[in-house]
Amino acid sequence: MNPLAYLPDGGDLPEVVTIGVSVSVPDPYGKRIQDARAGHGDPLARSIPTHVTLLPPTEVPAEVLPKIEEHLAAVAGAHRPFRMLLRGSGTFRPVSPVVFVRVEEGAQECRLLEADVRSGPLARELAFPYHPHVTVAHGLSDDVLDQAYEQARTFRAAFQVPGFSLSRFDEDEVWRPWRDYAFS
């Protein structure tokens, strides 16, 4: 497989690409969380689609993209669609200045997916233990994080998860979905 086929505009692919793998939070829920994140003044709100991370930002050589594509297709083929329930708020403070919406149902499926995704050509160590969540505010003042926590307490969303996405971090510092992988 030609790594250049990964670029929608047919442009040149850098030698090293920053990728991530995630479960997308569909609209209207994803938009509500993104709007809340923007409303809190989070500068990353519009550059990161609403998601549950399966693989955090990871730099990979462009030449391994075909192996990654095969790996992710195999992972998707080994999993089934599942229901996700997002409800209430949580935080990683004081360890990390993050407020999130909790994954109440589907967390175990995300843990299994994350372990499978983060193997083979994507094997890597994590800075923190994996904890499925949806970020609402990150790196903001304590007062704003407190407000975000309170506002997210009543959030609730239920939806089916049909698969996951491979995304890339572009030169304009925006994360964009690149490839979708449907579960069997």
Image (tube, rainbow, N blue to C red):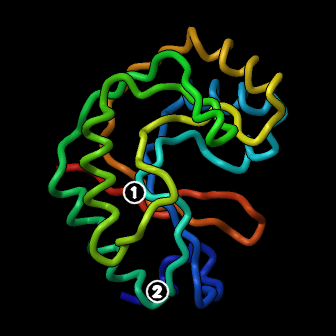
Name the residue located 32 percent from the left edge and 30 percent from the top edge: 160
- Place residue 123 in its image quadrant: bottom left
Q: Is residue 150 left or right of residue 108?
A: right
Question: In this rendering, is residue 162 above or below 12?
Answer: above
Label 1, label 2: how far apart the Cα atoms are: 16 Å
x, y (%) of residue 103?
41, 28
x, y (%) of residue 153?
58, 12
Image mark for residue 121? none
Question: In this rendering, is residue 87 above or below 9?
Answer: above
x, y (%) of residue 163?
32, 47
Image mark for residue 180? 1
Three-letter code for the amino acid on which mark 1 is drawn: Asp
Image mark for residue 3? 2
Name the residue located 18 percent from the left edge and 57 percent from the top edge: 77
Three-letter code for the amino acid on which mark 2 is drawn: Pro
x, y (%) of residue 147?
76, 17
- Place residue 96 in its image quadrant: top right
Density class for disc 2 (Cα within 10 Å; few <14, some 14-19, many ≥20) is: few
Name the residue located 51 percent from the left edge and 42 percent from the top edge: 51
